[in-house]
Image: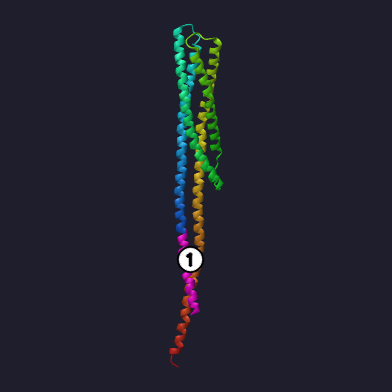
C-alpha cells in the first residue's frame, strides 16, 4: 500500500513538473515577444530621432549657405560704399541693411534648427548611456562626437551675432555721406571674416550627415544585439525547461512502473488461494 502511494505521488509530481516546464517555456517566449516589441518601439524611436536630426541638418546647411551669400552681399555693398555718387551710396546702404537684417533672422532660425537636432541626439545618447550601464555593448562614441560638433557650431553661430550687429550699427551711423576709408575698410574686413566663418560652418554641417550615419549604424547594431540577447535568453530558458522536463519524465516513468508492480503481488497472492489442492 505504501509503495502504491509513493508511486502515485511520484507520478503526480512528474506530471505537475512537466506542466510547469511547459508553462515556463510558454511564459519565456511570451516575455521574449513582448521585449522584442518594446525593443522595436524603442529603437524605432531612435531612428525617428535621427531622421529628424538629419532633416534639421539639411535645413541648417541650406540656411548657412544663404547666410554666406548675404555676407558676400554685405561685403560687395561695403566695397561700393566709397563711391562718390550719392545714388550708389544709397543703394549700397540699402543692400547692406537688408542683408544684415536677413543675417540676423537667419542666424536665429539656424540656431533653433540645430537646437532641435541637438535635443533629438541627446535623447538617443541618454538612452544609449542607460543601456550601457545595464551591460548592453553600445558604442556611443559617434553620438558623443556629434554632440560636441553641434555645440561647437552653435557657439560659432552665437559668436557671429556680435560682428553682424556691429556692421548694422556702423552702417546706420554712417548715413548716406561719404565715409572714411578706414571705417569702411574695417567693415569690409569684418564681413570677409563672416564669409570665411560661414564657409567653415557649412563644411562642418556637411560632415554632420556622415556622423549621423555612423551614430545611426551604432544604434542599429545595439538594437540587433539586444534582440539577439532576448532570443538567446528565451532559448536558454527553453533548454533548461526541457532538461528539467526530462527529469520530471523520469518521475512519471518511476511512478507508473511502481503502480504496475504494486498490482502484481496482489494478483499472485490471490491465485494460490483459489487453486484446488
The quarter of the image holding the C terminus is: bottom left
Work out whether residue 155 can be spotted.
yes
Image coords of residue 25 (percent x, y): 47, 58
Query: In the displayed structure, would residue 127 be above or below residue 30?
Result: above
Query: In the displayed structure, would residue 227 be above or below residue 113?
Result: below
The residue positioned farthest toward the front in the image shown: 173
Image coords of residue 8 (percent x, y): 47, 74
Work out whether residue 76 can be spotted.
no
Please provide the residue range marked out in magenta.
1-24
Magenta residues, dominant SS class: helix
Of residues 206 and 160, the one drawn nearer to the viewer in this rendering: 160
Using a 10 Å C-alpha cutoff, classify the residue at mark 1 as few (fewer than 14 neighbours), some (14 to 19) or many (20 or more): many
Disc 1: which residue: 17
Image coords of residue 94 (percent x, y): 44, 14
Query: In the displayed structure, would residue 276 be above or below residue 188?
Result: below
The residue positioned farthest toward the bottom in the image shown: 277
Specify whether residue 218 is painted magenta.
no
Amino acid at each position: 500500500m505504501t509503495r502504491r502511494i509513493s508511486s502515485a505521488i511520484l507520478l503526480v509530481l512528474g506530471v505537475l513538473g512537466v506542466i510547469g516546464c511547459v508553462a515556463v517555456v510558454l511564459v519565456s517566449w511570451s516575455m521574449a515577444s513582448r521585449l522584442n516589441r518594446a525593443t522595436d518601439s524603442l529603437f524605432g524611436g531612435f531612428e525617428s530621432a535621427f531622421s529628424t536630426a538629419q532633416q534639421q541638418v539639411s535645413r541648417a546647411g541650406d540656411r548657412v549657405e544663404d547666410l554666406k551669400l548675404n555676407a558676400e552681399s554685405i561685403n560687395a555693398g561695403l566695397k561700393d560704399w566709397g563711391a562718390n555718387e550719392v545714388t550708389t551710396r544709397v543703394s549700397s546702404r540699402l543692400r547692406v541693411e537688408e542683408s544684415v537684417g536677413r543675417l540676423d533672422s537667419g542666424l536665429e532660425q539656424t540656431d533653433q534648427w540645430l537646437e532641435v537636432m541637438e535635443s533629438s541626439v541627446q535623447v538617443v545618447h541618454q538612452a544609449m548611456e542607460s543601456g550601457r550601464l545595464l551591460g548592453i555593448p553600445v558604442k556611443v562614441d559617434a553620438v558623443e562626437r556629434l554632440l560636441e560638433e553641434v555645440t561647437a557650431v552653435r557657439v560659432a553661430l552665437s559668436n557671429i551675432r556680435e560682428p553682424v550687429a556691429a556692421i548694422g550699427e556702423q552702417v546706420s551711423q554712417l548715413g548716406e555721406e561719404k565715409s572714411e576709408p578706414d571705417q569702411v575698410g574695417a567693415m569690409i574686413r569684418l564681413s570677409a571674416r563672416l564669409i570665411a566663418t560661414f564657409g567653415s560652418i557649412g563644411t562642418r554641417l556637411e560632415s554632420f550627415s556622415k556622423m549621423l550615419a555612423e551614430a545611426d549604424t551604432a544604434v542599429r547594431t545595439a538594437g540587433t544585439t539586444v534582440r539577439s540577447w532576448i532570443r538567446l535568453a528565451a532559448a536558454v530558458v527553453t533548454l533548461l525547461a526541457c532538461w528539467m522536463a526530462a527529469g520530471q519524465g523520469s518521475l512519471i516513468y518511476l511512478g507508473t512502473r511502481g503502480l504496475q508492480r504494486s498490482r502484481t503481488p496482489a494478483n499472485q497472492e490471490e491465485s494460490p488461494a483459489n487453486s484446488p489442492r
